[in-house]
Amino acid sequence: MSTDFDAVIVGAGFGGMYMLHRLRQKGFAARVIEAGSGVGGTWYWNRYPGARCDVESVQYSYQFSAELEQEWEWTERYATQPEILRYANHVADRFDLRRDIQFETRITSAVFDETANVWRVETNKGDKVAARFVITAMGCLSSPNTPKIEGLADFKGPTYHTGNWPHDGVAFTGKTVGVIGTGSSAIQSIPIMAEQARHLTVFQRTANYTVPAHNKPLDPAYVAKVKAHYPEMRKRAKTKPAGIDFVINMASAIETPEAERRRLFEERWAYGGLGFMASFSDLLLNDESNKTAADFVRAKIREVVKDPKTAEILTPKNIIGCKRLCVDTGYWETFNRPNVTLVDISDEPIERITAAGLRAKGQDYAFDCLVLATGFDAMTGALLKVDIRGRGGVALKDKWREGPKSYLGLTVVGFPNLFTITGPGSPSVLTNMLPSIEQHVDFIADCLEALRARGVSVIEPIEQAQEAWVGQVGNAANITLRSTCSSWYVGANIPGKPRVFMPYIGGLPAYIAACETVVKNDYEGFALA
Ligand code: NAP
């Protein structure tokens, strides 16, 4: 059976772009289908004010090309969304990727034809394409969650979702604004919207932990040093669970004397960023240790927020790091502003959206614009929006009705020749996405090359291997406190979604080792035909 392409790649974010590059290098014909009008994935869609990556720019970048590493200049410790989008565009131009990317097109279905062993892919533009492989690179946080609050359509003003922000920006100057949500996107955007708006009302269901970014322009001497030692830094990063090169203090928080513990927390706090959770090795393993970090942050909130009642509402009650830790610039300080109001909706959901604003706890709130910072249907949302059907016409959404199951987060029993970059069961969202993406892509590209070399046309994981991996993902999750709260990691933010801890929390090094063993043992766990 002839095919139009060896592979169809879904999405032109960092995963899809690198996948295309690697497949081309190996002489495969690939076509990328991308819904947006440009490359960049999450950085194309999430254009809300203040959007920036909370992994340091020199680490949140590709490492596959030394030339690219040397020629690109990051300007800030944490890159802004526009800068990362410029980087994505630079990569697309530098490696001449656009000619194989079909923009403004969504895949609507991908059906495996068992008689010909090809995927038949259809798009919303009427394309019908046959390909040997389908490789999804759709992102883990790319399907925005618009909560089903009654009356949403009644609101007379504009409604914006942080995950699908207007490309021309939004002028909030002189406007009154309502914001629903206090996750990472809200915590980044609220301080900036508050500076612009006449009045900002924040509706908070769950208070969140955040650590200061201490963002700053990058010193050229520091950049030169990083550039001179990129390979060593990347190598060190790959030995760390999160794939980020920061120092993990291997001591236990509760076994460390209080004064010393406080000194170490202060040191990390002053440095800023996600490395705060690496102050001690057991913060996510032990309730008591976790409480020391949580109490430290709670005290910081009381130091900053002047009104004790507001400080109390902003103080998280749950485990620190259970929901994704946020990184901010001036978040709590924002609640000292006279034009900002915080409304606690933890005990009663919003009653309804009204024409003028919303009604919560029996009170009406009016505003000109509404911002939904309400997150995503994470890890499975984008995949399950497409009608993906494997053997016997079985739909992925039926296969995953009780929760996603995969082999290595990359492949699914019953769906031959389908690869899911950063799929559920992979470390992805618990790691620095760029090295994780590159590892996945290299694994897939090498696999396709190995199959071609031996004339194999179909690869599919076997049931026992998938069950064993699912068991490993579950066991790893059970060890940490991270699986114990209602987060998007377990699908708790989407009503009706099965509660399964979706990412693999065993760390990037363990995951890389597992993939290497699979390859070394001749694609152990896969059936090749
Ligand atoms: P999120 O963390 O899921 O936060 C969504 C917020 O909306 C939560 O406060 C949630 O409350 C609230 N919410 C949802 N439905 C609601 C409803 N019906 N009524 C009231 N409140 C509701 O989403 P996000 O902020 O977009 O972040 C998602 C992830 O994207 C992050 O965890 C992070 O991994 C990534 N991200 C990274 C960066 C970065 O690199 N700096 C920036 C943004 C996002 P509950 O907590 O009670 O559910």
Image (cartoon, rainbow, N blue to C red):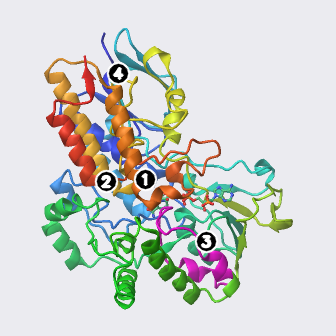
- Report the front residue among 47 and 359: 359
Q: Which mark is residue 478?
A: 1
Q: Is residue 80 visible?
A: yes
CA separation in Å, label 3 and label 1: 39 Å
The quadrant of the image that shows the C terminus is: top left
Choose the circle earlier in sequence order: 3 or 1: 3
Q: Is residue 298 left or right of residue 19?
A: right
Q: Which mark is residue 434?
A: 2
CA separation in Å, label 2 and label 4: 26 Å
CA separation in Å, label 3 and label 4: 46 Å
Choose the circle earlier in sequence order: 1 or 4: 4
Label 3's element?
helix
Q: Position of residue 32 (x, y in %)?
A: 37, 34
| Quarter of the image where one finds residue 423 | top left
* Ligand 1 under 8 Å from disc 3 Cβ: no
**At x 48% / y 62%, what residue is drawn?**
324
Q: Is residue 312 magenta?
A: yes
Question: What residue is pinned by disc 4?
Answer: 131
Q: Which mark is residue 193?
A: 3
CA separation in Å, label 1 and label 4: 39 Å
Query: Magenta part of the protein: which range?
Result: 310-337
Choose the circle earlier in sequence order: 2 or 4: 4
The number of numbered badges drawn on the structure is: 4
* Ligand 1 under 8 Å from disc 2 Cβ: no
Q: Ligand 1 shows up in which quadrant of the image?
A: bottom right
Q: Is residue 325 magenta?
A: yes
Give the amino acid at mark 4.
Ala
Q: Residues within 10 Å of mark 2 (few under 14, many from 20)?
A: some
Label 1's element?
helix
Q: Is residue 242 left or right of residue 174?
A: left
